[in-house]
Image (cartoon, rainbow, N blue to C red):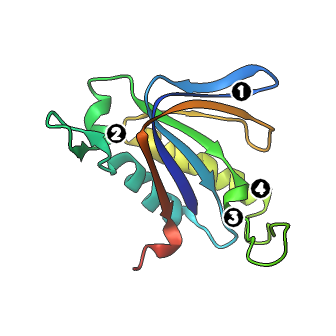
């Protein structure tokens, strides 16, 4: 499971001009599910996302997590399913999507990831699975982190 996590001032996702999910601040998470991913990958990634210390403390150091700041703010997660994170462009000019999970599995793990975020007491908004979405956001910092559950054992 791969994720691109961006610290944002605001973020929203729309389908056909209708906003499906939005947050005022927090983390925009683009989530890609691979063929061999499982709930264990989603457990690790949801815990890492909620506890990643990338928000500034009183001294201006990145020392606080989303869980740390959510109690005093309206910060949350906007999770957007993105199979293109699993694109393999090492050969040729057109990416291969062979590493991406089939839609049924990807949707199940995407929804499981969001449920695990919510279980941690966090707001989790979402896009619309398998839809053409327009994502609008203001990156804060900018801060962008790449996470890959395949690297858990490293």
First-in-chain label (1 vs 4): 1
Q: Which residue is drawn at 69% across and 50% down?
A: 82
Q: Nearer the viewer, mark 1 or mark 4?
A: 1
First-in-chain label (3 vs 2): 2
First-in-chain label (1 vs 2): 1
Q: How many marks?
A: 4
Question: What crowding class fits label 4: few (fewer than 14 Cα within 10 Å), some (14-19), or many (20 or more)?
Answer: few
Indicate left or right for 81 with 139 as reference. Answer: right
Question: What's the distance in space between the residues labelled 2 and 4, CA to CA?
Answer: 29 Å
Q: Where is residue 141 in the image (x, y as percent from the top left)?
A: 39, 39
Specify the label residue 104 is tagged with: 4
Q: Is mark 4 on a helix, strand or loop?
A: helix
Question: From the viewer's perspective, is residue 52 above or below residue 2?
Answer: above
Q: Residue at x 75, y 19 (%)?
A: 18
Question: What's the distance in space between the residues labelled 3 and 4, CA to CA?
Answer: 16 Å
Question: What's the distance in space between the residues labelled 3 and 1, CA to CA?
Answer: 22 Å
Question: What crowding class fits label 1: few (fewer than 14 Cα within 10 Å), some (14-19), or many (20 or more)?
Answer: some
Label 3 with label 2: CB-CB less than 8 Å? no
* Residue marked by disc 2: 66
Indicate left or right for 150 with 13 as reference. Answer: left
Q: Where is residue 43 in the image (x, y as percent from the top left)?
A: 46, 58
* Residue marked by disc 1: 14
Q: Which of marks 3 and 4 is in front?
A: 3
């Amino acid at each position: 499971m791969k994720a691109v996590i961006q610290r944002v001032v605001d973020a929203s996702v729309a389908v056909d001009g209708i906003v499906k999910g939005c947050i005022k601040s927090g983390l925009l998470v683009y989530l890609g599910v691979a063929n061999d991913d499982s709930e264990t990958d989603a457990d690790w990634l949801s815990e890492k996302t909620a506890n990643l210390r990338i928000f500034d403390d009183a001294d201006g150091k990145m020392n606080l997590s989303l869980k740390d700041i959510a109690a005093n703010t309206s910060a949350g997660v906007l999770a957007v399913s993105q199979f293109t994170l699993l694109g393999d462009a090492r050969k040729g000019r057109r990416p291969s999507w062979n590493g991406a999970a089939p839609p049924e599995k990807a949707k199940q793990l995407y929804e499981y990831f969001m449920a695990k975020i919510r279980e941690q007491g966090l707001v989790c908004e979402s896009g619309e699975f398998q839809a053409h979405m327009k994502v609008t956001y203001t990156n804060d910092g900018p801060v962008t982190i790449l996470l890959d559950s395949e690297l858990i054992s490293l």
